[in-house]
Image (cartoon, rainbow, N blue to C red):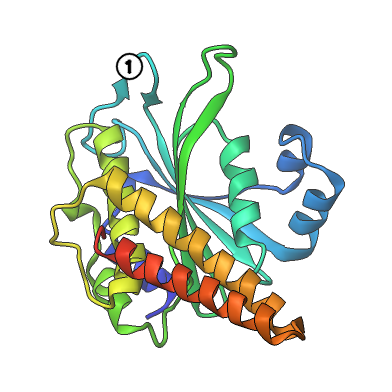
C-alpha cells in the first residue's frame, strides 16, 4: 500500500479535494517559531499539502458550535518529512499555528503517522485556540505493517464516522487513532470494543510515561557500578513494567 492508496481508501469526497501547497514561510511568519523550530522546518519538512477541506459545502455534515468549540471546517493535511524523528514537534507547531481542526498525515519513505488535536476556544483571546488533547499514531510501515495495524490501514474510512456534525466526525477519527495506539500494546484489533475515551487516553499517556521512565532507568543501569545500585534500578524497572501491564487492562 502506498500513501496515495491509503488516502484514496479513506473515501473523502472529490468535492473536498484541494491539493494546495502550504509554504513553510507562513509558519515562520505566523507561528512565533524559535530558531530551533525554524531549523526543524527548514531541514526536515520536505513539503506541506492541504489535501482535502471538509465543510458543509464539500461533505454532507453540519458544522458545530458551542461555548467552547467551533467546528465548521476540517483540513486533511499531508506533511512529507526527510526524517521521522521530529514529527511530533512539527505536529505541535502546525496544530498551534492553524486555528481550525486538522487531520495531519505525516509520511517518511514508506511509513505514515497520523496526528490530530482537539481544540477549544481561548476565552481570553477569541482569535486563538487552546489544544485540549493531541494524539499521534505510531509510525506505520505501509509496505509491511505489523498485524495490529493492518485492519486500520486496510479498512478505516469515513464510512465508519458519524455524520451528525463535524465535531462528532473529528472525534471518531480521534477514537480510531486512540484504538490503534491501544492495539499496539494489546497486540490485537480493538476497534469493535466500546471504548471509554478518557480512560483509554489517560491509560495510554500513563503507559508512555512509564516507558520513558524505564528507558531512563535502563540508561542509569548501564553506567551503574555498585551491585546495590543495580539491584535498586532493576526493582524500579520491574515496578514500571508491572504498572504497564495493569494499565493495559484499561485499554
Q: Position of residue 184 (x, y in %)?
A: 35, 73
Q: Say above or below: 231 vs 48.
A: below
Q: Position of residue 145 (x, y in %)?
A: 37, 82
Report the residue marked by disc 1: 66
Q: Say above or below: 97 vs 110.
A: above
Q: Residue at x 60, y 75 (%)?
A: 232
Secondary structure of residue under mark 1: loop
Q: How many labels, in total?
A: 1
Q: Residue at x 76, y 58 (%)?
A: 40
Q: For residue 11, which quarter of the picture?
A: bottom left
In the displayed structure image, the side of residue 245 where residue 236 appears, left or right: right
Q: Residue at x 32, y 75 (%)?
A: 149
Q: Residues within 10 Å of mark 1 (few under 14, many from 20)?
A: few
In the displayed structure image, the side of residue 23 where residue 114 appears, left or right: left
Closer to the camera, 14 or 53?
Answer: 53
Q: Is residue 173 visible?
A: no
Q: Is residue 133 visible?
A: yes
Q: Position of residue 242 (x, y in %)?
A: 38, 71
Q: Position of residue 58 (x, y in %)?
A: 31, 38
Q: For residue 47, which quarter of the picture?
A: bottom right
Q: Say above or below: 39 vs 167.
A: below
Q: Residue at x 18, y 39 (%)?
A: 163
Residue furthest to the right in view is 35
Quadrant placement of the N terminus: bottom left
Q: For residue 224, which quarter of the picture?
A: bottom right
Residue furthest to the front in view is 228
Quadrant placement of the C terminus: bottom left
Amino acid at each position: 500500500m502506498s500513501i496515495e492508496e491509503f488516502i484514496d481508501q479513506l473515501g473523502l469526497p472529490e468535492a473536498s479535494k484541494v491539493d494546495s501547497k502550504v509554504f513553510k514561510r507562513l509558519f515562520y511568519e505566523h507561528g512565533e517559531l524559535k530558531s530551533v523550530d525554524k531549523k526543524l522546518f527548514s531541514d526536515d519538512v520536505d513539503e506541506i499539502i492541504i489535501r482535502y477541506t471538509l465543510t458543509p459545502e464539500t461533505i454532507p455534515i453540519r458544522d458545530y458550535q458551542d461555548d467552547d468549540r467551533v467546528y465548521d471546517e476540517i483540513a486533511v493535511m499531508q506533511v512529507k518529512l526527510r526524517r521521522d524523528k521530529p514529527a511530533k514537534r512539527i505536529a505541535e507547531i502546525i496544530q498551534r499555528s492553524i486555528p481550525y481542526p486538522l487531520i495531519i498525515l505525516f509520511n517518511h519513505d514508506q511509513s505514515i503517522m497520523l496526528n490530530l488535536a482537539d481544540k477549544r476556544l481561548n476565552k481570553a483571546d477569541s482569535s486563538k485556540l487552546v489544544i485540549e488533547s493531541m494524539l499521534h499514531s505510531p509510525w506505520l510501515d505501509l509496505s509491511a505493517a505489523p498485524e495490529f495495524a493492518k485492519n486500520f490501514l486496510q479498512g478505516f474510512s469515513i464510512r465508519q464516522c458519524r455524520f451528525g456534525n463535524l465535531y462528532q466526525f473529528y472525534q471518531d477519527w480521534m477514537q480510531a487513532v486512540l484504538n490503534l495506539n491501544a492495539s499496539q500494546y494489546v497486540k490485537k484489533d480493538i476497534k469493535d470494543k466500546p471504548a471509554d475515551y478518557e480512560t483509554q487516553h489517560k491509560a495510554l499517556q500513563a503507559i508512555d510515561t512509564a516507558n520513558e521512565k524505564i528507558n531512563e532507568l535502563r540508561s542509569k543501569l548501564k553506567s551503574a557500578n555498585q551491585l546495590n545500585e543495580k539491584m535498586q534500578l532493576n526493582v524500579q524497572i520491574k515496578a514500571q513494567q508491572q504498572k504497564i501491564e495493569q494499565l493495559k487492562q484499561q485499554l
